Amino acid sequence: MAKRTKKKTSKKVSKSAGARSSGKLGAVSFEELQAEMNRRAKVVGRLERKRERLHSELAEVESELASYGALSASGGIRRRPRNEMNLVDTLQSVLKNKTMSVTDAAQAARDAGYMTTAANFRTIVNQALIRETKVFKKVSRGQYTAK
């Protein structure tokens, strides 16, 4: 097969085309460069004003979220609460010298200050009670105590 070569053609850069279409900076006049810099400066100014407006809107939304207690101390949205003790330790302190059902243990953990956003927290408590056989003892069906 014969090798094809591209034929180079010289393109004349029109003032309206500017540097965007030609790709050759040397073919662009100073006036065109100045016009492009001015255009970009306007765009940057418009974007900076938009950013400031969005920052103020975000501050209003965060303020409203904070009033509902949905923000952490750092100001960010917190989806998963942080607890001082893990779930097993909390359940162990709640069940010490007591026998409770899974539902009662889940409620007692919440009453003791354990925070969760889980819709199925009772199931999570049940799994922890079953899994941690060194910490919890099954007294009867659905009834657990701490060892």
Image (cartoon, rainbow, N blue to C red):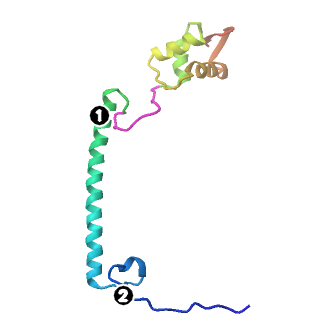
Circles 1 and 2: CB distance less than 8 Å?
no
Give the mark nearer the N terminus: 1 vs 2.
2
The secondary structure that most of the magenta stretch takes on is: loop
Q: Position of residue 21 (x, y in %)?
A: 42, 78
Q: Which residue position holds label 2?
A: 27
Q: Is residue 12 left or right of residue 50?
A: right
Q: Amino acid at mark 1?
A: Ser
Q: Position of residue 64 (x, y in %)?
A: 30, 31
Task: Name above or below for residue 44 compared with residue 2.
Answer: above
Q: Position of residue 100 (x, y in %)?
A: 58, 8
Task: Name above or below for residue 117 compared with residue 108.
Answer: below
Q: Nearer the viewer, residue 18 or 50?
A: 18
The residue shown at (30%, 28%) is 67
Q: Which residue position holds label 1?
A: 63
Which span of residues is magenta-colored?
72-84
Residue 1 placement: quadrant: bottom right
Report the quarter where the C terminus lies.
Answer: top right
Task: Name above or below for residue 57 compared with residue 19.
Answer: above
Whether residue 92 appears in magenta in the rendering, the answer is no
Q: Is residue 135 left or right of residue 11?
A: right
Q: Residue furthest right?
A: 1
Q: Is residue 77 left or right of residue 57?
A: right
Counting every numbered tag in the picture gives 2
Q: Amino acid at mark 2?
A: Ala
The residue shown at (64%, 91%) is 4
| Distance from Cα at disc 1 to Cα at disc 2 | 53 Å
Residue 108 shows in this picture: yes
